[in-house]
Amino acid sequence: MTLLSVENLVTSFKTSAGEVRAVDGVSIAVERGQTLGIVGESGCGKSVLSLSIMQLLAHPGRVVEGKVLLEGRNLLDLSARQMRAVRGREIAMIFQEPMTSLNPVHSIGYQITEAMRAHEPSLSAAELRNRAVAVLDRVRIPSAARRFDEYPHQLSGGMRQRVMIAMALACKPKLLIADEPTTALDVTVQAQILELLRELQAENGMGIILITHDLGVIAEMADRVSVMYAGRVVERSSSAELFDDPQHPYTLGLLGSIPRVDEEKDRLTAIEGAVPPPFAWPPGCRFAPRCPFSIEACTQAPPALREVAPDHAAACLEAPL
Amino acid sequence: MSATASAGPVTAPRRPSAFRMLMKDTGAAIALVFVVLIVLAAVFAPWLAPKDPYETDLMSIMSPPSADYWFGTDGQGRDIFARTLYGLQVTLFMGLTSLIIGGVLGALVGFLAAYYKRLDGLLMRFMDILLSFPAILFGLALAAIFGPGLTSVIIALSIATIPLMARIVRGAAVVVMGLDYIEAARAVGMTDKRIMLRHLAPNCLSPIFVFATLRLGQVILLGSALSFLGLGAQPPVAELGAMASQGRNFLFIAPHISVVPSIAIFAVVLAFNVLGDALRDALDPRLRI
Amino acid sequence: MAKYALQRLALAIPVLLGVLLVGFFLMQVVPTDPAIIRAGPQATQDVVEAIREELGLNKPLWQQFGLYMWRLFQGDLGVSIINNVAVTQELGDTIGPTLELMVASLFWSIPLGILMGTLAAYWRGSLIDRGIMAISVAGVSVPVFFIGLLMIWLLGFQWQLLPFTGRGGPLWTMDGIMAIILPALTLGGVFVGPVARMTRTAVVDMLSADHVRTARAKGLNEFLVVLRHALRNALIPVITLIGLQIGFLLGGAVVTETIFSWPGVGRLAVGAILSSDFPMAQGTIIVLSLGFILINLAVDLLYAVLDPRVRLS
Amino acid sequence: MTHLLEVVDIAKHYPSGKGAVKAVDGVSFTLERGETLALVGESGCGKSTTARLVLRLIERSRGTVRFNGEDITALSPGALRRFRRNAQIIFQDPYASLNPRLRVGEAIMEPMEVHGIGTPAERRKRMEELLGLVGLAPYHAARYPHEFSGGQRQRIGIARALAVQPELVVCDEPVSALDVSIQAQVVNLLKDLQARFGLSFLFIAHDLAVVKHMADRIAVMYLGRIVEVAQTNELFANPRHPYTRALLAAIPHPDPARRGHVKPLGGDLPSPLNPPPGCHFHTRCPFATEICRSQDPVATGGAHSVACHHADTLPPMGAAYEGHISEAARRRLARYAEASAARSLAG
Amino acid sequence: QQQPRNQITIMREIDSDRYDPHRTTALAGGEVLTMLSDTLVSMDFDMRTIRPGLAERWEVSPDGKTYTFHLRRDVTFCDGRALTADDVVYSINRWIGRTTPRVVSPVAWRAGNVKEVRAVDPYTVEYELNEPFGELLSQLTQFFGSIVDRATVERLGDNFGVQGFNGTGPYCWASWTPRSELVLTRHPTYRWGPPVLQNRGPAHVERVVWRVIPEAAARVAALQAGQADITQYIPEAFWDGMRRVPTLRTSNQENYFWDVFMGFKVDKPVVSDLAIRRAAHMAVDRVGLARAIWSGHATPARNIVNPNALDYDAQSDAMVPNYDPAAARRTLDEAGWRMGPDGVRVKDGQRATFLMYAINNLANQRAAEIIQQGLRQVGIEMRVQLFDATVAWGRLATQEFDAYILSYPYISATDALSLYWHSRNRPSPNRMNWNDPQTDAWLEEARRGLTPEARATATANIQRRLAEQAPWLTLARNQLTVFATQRVEGARAHGLYGIGIYRGLDLRVVR
Ligand SMILES: Nc1ncnc2c1ncn2[C@@H]1O[C@H](COP(=O)(O)OP(=O)(O)OP(=O)(O)O)[C@@H](O)[C@H]1O
Ligand SMILES: Nc1ncnc2c1ncn2[C@@H]1O[C@H](COP(=O)(O)OP(=O)(O)OP(=O)(O)O)[C@@H](O)[C@H]1O
Ligand SMILES: [Mg+2]
Ligand SMILES: [Mg+2]
């Protein structure tokens, strides 16, 4: 059974400018031991999607449609209490900003044990400590026992992100959602964290949803990829397939926009214009106004995500290109 | 840095003006109207007051509100309505004067401290020292030195406002100073004066505005408390705090003498506070204190 | 931490000096010659001169300041012009009741304010929030004396529930407790509003902070999230702001003491100023400032205790 | 012929509680006219500080900066103002780099006004030209910054920098805060402008791919010092400093075929407050020996200079990354580029 | 909450600056001093009859110049020492400024023109005057004549009556927190109370707490709530209401002479003008004032002397100008005071403005504002400066002001007049600077008072002269009512020098 599948999820925000569907009919799926990469530019709804899965949306946000099935169980049907038991225990999450995602006033040991205590209240203090030190060790924090009592501000950014990962792993979740876990870090540290995630996945066999806007990270980590644009998935395939055979014009645009180390080019192929804000999303294909291939029909109705090659879907009338 | 920053809209709808945002908040709109009314009432007190605020009617002492005396009369048979109007004038004058004196000086210090880092330590340490004296102590000290009176109160409140305004302005200005457009202005070779006047100050106005509105309420509260203690405006001057103080002797037989001016102070301060809160929400939600 | 504490202390020193200097100059600029006052209206010139000599008023200013500091150091703030009692003794008698009153007011107002602020923040935008915030803004707008007068009028006079005519005795006696209720309600009453507002702001900030999202993602229940992750962190700014607001409280205390005939420093100060008892006025002002500085110092240290970023650096 | 810019052993130490933060600690480089020199390195290594020192936006602790042969660290206020016409800066954060209270047109005209360039009418005309140059329309001049997207603001910032017709433009991470698609637009714009006006860029970035695309030469910084300088291609083909190698090895390439090639470097960046003695990099360097712990390495090697005790004895790194891009992808990218160019001509 | 059974709390509005009978003249001092000490003779409730005190009997020589007092033999001070004639001699001498260090009592003249006070034996005192003084015995009943212990006086020096006290009164000094609370404890061996009281001693209650509660409202409520037992300081506005409260009892004194007045310094500009002074009389509505400030519980006044007092002259009453603003304006017009643009009259470049000082209390504050308004209506500006009671006396002794409001108690016309109008008593209490040899002569005559007729004539002459010259505007005659809770008995209003509770021996807790 699929570990997690999200079906036709719609999340909306009530704002002064009206209702905004930040995530608009998104479906994704992750298997055990697999990494799903979600890539897209800023504001396309990646974080809202992950928070919707966790049901951690802040006030004006609300899931209005769809299903979030964790091993077949629809999380949207759970009570608040049941959902709490899922969070941290079955699905864990790490965030982009290691600087602010840890509570500065509690020791990192406390913050890790807190997660364990929430799900296994029977553990004694000593057990909690041992397990926390063990998990800190696992994420390669040097002299973990000593670090246990330190506070976030005493750690470097990379260390903090490791602590975040340790916290997420404390209860051995089946699925880890990593929302841009390395964006705030330097390349050398990013490489460390990515390697760590890969190792841990190999050990635990957990599923990972890795959110990023860096195609390099996707190539490095993901087994399957969903490309998001303006609240929708526009292309979905295996990672290899995406780079070898990109089908959606937006994906092409992204690939063209990044300078490649291995290539001498005078000009990058940029995408014209900018991502429109959610309240200004056009009808029809949302990429149409920026798309060099757009035709009249693109602006009429949103194109469905359809298979254009085996196990490779794109939401474009023109596809396969 | 992440790539989050560019989510800005290409053609955002024009940000609604602060005034519009204010008017959307019913409470704030009422407060604004109320503040305007109060100011008008204070300014036009001589024309609005149905009676002379100092005229004593010995035939109706401490009479409760009636058609003749809308808010009743005080212990000397004076019309409380008229006195309240004049009291608003005195109270607002006291509040505004000290706010302006203290605010201008404080803002100057704040800007200088933020702009010239070398002065920062010295100036702000000095402000800290000033801040170590609660306003009431300035009030007490000045009353001790110059004797009780409105002038003492105004000076005290001005001094007490300086460090607060300096901190607010410095806080805002330091943030702005850290922004790239200041650096850009320097890189282009602008003079300090030009940078301060054209780039720094205009971008610190919101917090100054918000603070001033909220502070006005505080200043009025403090000033009327000092008058209530007998350290401020001296009778027979119609000052709201002093009026409340006089009336408290008859609290049990004629509560309106104290209650009316107290409510007037309350209403004025409440209006400024509600307005200040709304302004803050409209201008800069991060300023919440 | 120790270093931080020392730093704070060091910062307090210029402030302290400032206070003392102001205290000193207070006596310099008062329009009355302390010697003449001390000597009484009928004294002859040579008696006044003798007193000037005795008080060191003939010496140059800096020497007088030295003398003043030296006397201060020995706990000598001079004697009251009115009744010749040592100022320090009067202060000693009145400081207890003032502290009593302040503590009693903070004792209920801070917890209540924090509770109200937290509830309002948690249900931000709801009716509860609006209700609490309306109460708070009213609370910060109401003159202390208005609350006091209402308390006296209703609770004291109309319903005769509680006394309001001064201190009833030590706090461990029933009389003492009964007598402090109304003043403490009055003084605390003006503090609830500010605390609630500050708490709400801070907790709202914290509730949208990333680490609170992390806590929720761990599966913590809401109570723990709010208590340990939002409120706990929010306390840091709240404590600082409370420290700053203590000045406000001090002002309230002076008024409250006056209305309730509470034999504290505030009332002593007002009385001394009104009766031009300059040494006493000076003493009370110095003591009130010192108290304020000490409280802020304590707040700063508490701040450090609450915030490991400060504590451990 | 002198260099356009010559920086000699410049340093900036910020006093702090214990000791000094050595944000920049002895940096030297040159920049020629029309050239782009990139400064790369991890966060906090002193790139922005160097940029500010070059423009004398902050006062140096030591060293000299010569612009057209003139030592700008010794300029009088008046001379400094003249210098500012010739050297401008573009910032990273598009939101902070524009005064929200100034209309965009005013913001662009202001530098000209300050330097007394032209009449008001001429300035207005030039401003409109500049707007066109960076891809905006004249009617944008009357708008406020908040009405623009991040990419557009970055363009406005560029227009403002170009308003005084500088020879040198310091770009402090001008694209790091932008989305990839926008980043490409700005990078293209900068390259166009450089070609058109013969600008010299001191280009600061941490993204090696962008740097490779932009720069003629690259200087790699680590903890306040430059560890390696070389021509771009030379650096990528033959990185000689262990740190440069680690940086290159850590880049995730958009190429699943190369999956797992990333070789992380151990450890964290030490604090500039008390950098390790000797070679700053020795704490993380796999090749470090005793000498590295005690002695500062000196830069050697002329055009390709390296500051490493073991530069000559390091094992070869192996072939530089050779991309694999599928035929299908390459073809589609080309089609996209064509279609895109066609559209923009038409539109 | 309830008071301890053996304690009575008496409330008042202000505190005294000190409790030294020879250095204070404040009522706040006197009311406590009558409990702390005794006088040679005592005053009955009729305010005329002199009764024994420390002296069980006395003789007056035929020429009226020598008084011989025979002291009780059982009297002791609070510290246990027995009272002897030397103590009396010392105390009287201290009062009249004949001890070292010299104490200057502002009211030394009340002791008469003393030649010598001698101890004939330990229990006999001879009090010899240079001239007869008809009022001597009444004056000796006042607290200025209190007998104090020399040793304590000398030990405490300036702090006598501040940090401690030692007297022979029914209560002893326990502690004083200025402006807050003064505690007295029972003098356990006291049994020499004046015969005007039912209880001759010792006192029924163990502790008397004098509590200062500046807030009138607080005093009212405290009394109603039983937090305090007795007070005479209830603003008249509350009297009617309080009289209806079943838990309270009241005691009135009919023979009460306490007047509120405004005095003019007749040698200061503006107020030196008789027209101004007379106009002021006509501009102030004393009937309205009595109603407004004292809620009708004060008698509107004209003449200086209370009609019930000895030697009151009815004819001069008619000479005092009545309230008539129109007449006031006319008077001023005639005197050449022209209305200025700001509503204040001017004459010879002099604005009709004067400065008035008074003690800062509620009644003065209110009265001042009303008078100010009344004067303004006729074109006279009165500037007001109020002082805390503790400083006011000092300021009132200066020449800084032009007029002042004060109130004072007296026993008879002679008493009242000789206090304020003898040129010898300038600058204080003769703050009017009244310097008239004729008045002085009449005063001497009245004081000597060999026959009642001669005295009455002399005092009548003074009253008429003052009515004519209008240096003094009597604002109202106060009434005395002591309020007490049902818990206490024996709180009978006395009124000597305005003191409500005399000696306090009859006070008793009944519930
Ligand atoms: N609280 C909110 N109220 C209104 N709109 C919101 C809210 N939160 C998010 N949105 C909208 O939802 C859209 C998606 O936001 P989201 O944070 O998921 O983007 P993202 O893809 O994670 O971007 P980034 O790369 O910047 O993290 C944004 O355009 C934003 O405007
Ligand atoms: N004003 C300052 N006071 C003290 N230290 C400073 C100051 N400015 C910068 N630093 C320190 O100097 C070091 C270098 O800073 P700089 O901003 O030059 O780094 P950078 O390479 O530009 O980093 P980034 O990539 O994050 O922009 C940092 O450790 C920083 O903390
Ligand atoms: Mg996101
Ligand atoms: Mg930088």
Image (cartoon, coloured by chain):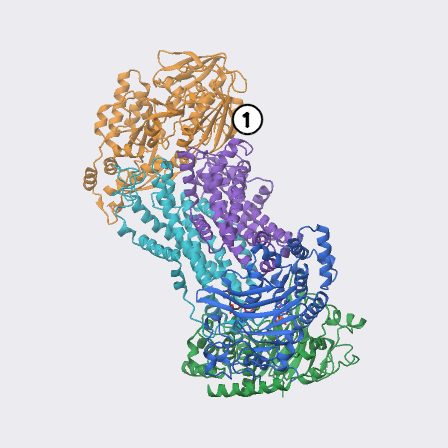
Q: Which percent across, then down, holds residue B190? A: 50, 74
SS for callout 1 = helix
- Residue at image mark 1: E155
Q: In which chain is the residue bearing label 1?
A: E
Q: The cyan chain is which one?
A: B
Question: In the image, is residue A70 above or below residue C96?
Answer: below
Vertical placement of D244 versus A62: above or below?
Answer: below
Can residue D6 be spotted in the picture? yes
**Hey, what amino acid is under mark 1?**
Arg
Is residue E473 visible in the rendered structure shown here?
Answer: no
Q: Chain A is drawn in which colour?
A: blue
Residue D267, x across and y down, in percent? 72, 68
User: Can you tell which chain is drawn purple?
Assistant: C
Is residue E81 depicted above or below A130 in this figure? above
Q: Which of A248 and B91 is in front in this view?
A: A248
Question: Where residue A102 sits in the image (x, y, percent)?
Answer: 62, 60
Residue found farthest to the right: D290
Which is nearer the eye, D266 or E116? D266
Q: In which quarter of the image is the N terminus of chain B?
A: bottom right
Q: Kindly indicate which chain is depicted in orange in the rendered structure.
A: E
The location of residue D123, given as percent across then percent down, is: 44, 81
- Count of number-bearing discs: 1
> Chain D takes which shade in the image?
green
